[in-house]
Amino acid sequence: MKINLTKKQYKDLIIMSGLANSVLGILGDSLPDTDYKRRSDRMNELEEYFLKYAKDFDCGEFVEEFEGKDVFEEKAYEKHIMSIIFDYDEGQLMSNLANKLAWRDFREEHSDKEIEKMGKENGGYFGVELYDYEKKYWDEFEQHGFNRLMINTDK
């Protein structure tokens, strides 16, 4: 089988492989007793295979040789892979934190019975009920980042 790619498609492909390889590598290193390490190794081989053709697609600046293997060039990796991962991490951090804090506030204002009743009425979905709680934190993070996030030791 042969697959024809444009130069832009090839560039997107190696960036996607770099992202996948990075995520699987992080998971493989931090959760070693899972399948992630094996998947990371396979993804690493696939990335190396893709990078072999970088010069053919005018993407030679993406590649450098390290220990006899083609790998992402450090600056290209930082620009095209790590910048996306940092943006994703930042978004996930804010999303998860807004959700956790919203649930905390929601639970402070509603009894367990009320929450159980809402859950039954909405099929377990609390998106509408939590919206204003989460929005408060999203607005805060958008305007001030985490600068005003403090731990209250008075309680």
Image (spheres, helix red, strand yellow):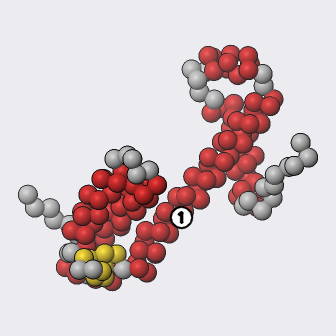
Q: Is residue 113 left or right of residue 21?
A: right
Q: Residue furthest front?
A: 33
Secondary structure found at label 1: helix
Q: Position of residue 61 (x, y in %)?
A: 33, 83
Q: Quadrant of residue 112?
A: top right
Q: Is residue 128 visible?
A: yes
Q: Quadrant of the C terminus?
A: top right
Q: Which residue is mark 1?
A: 86
Local packing at callout 1 (Cα closer than 10 Å; few below 14, some 14-19, many 20+) is: few
Q: Is residue 52 left or right of residue 15?
A: left
Q: Which residue shows up at 73% across the image and 52% down it?
A: 139
Q: With respect to residue 88, does 77 lie above or below?
A: below
Q: Quadrant of residue 50?
A: bottom left
Q: Position of residue 133 (x, y in %)?
A: 74, 39
Q: Position of residue 138 (x, y in %)?
A: 70, 50
Q: With respect to residue 114, does 24 lie above or below?
A: below
Q: Is residue 9 visible?
A: no
Query: Could you tell me the amino acid type at mark 1?
Result: Phe
Q: Residue furthest right?
A: 154
Q: With respect to residue 116, does 71 lie above or below?
A: below
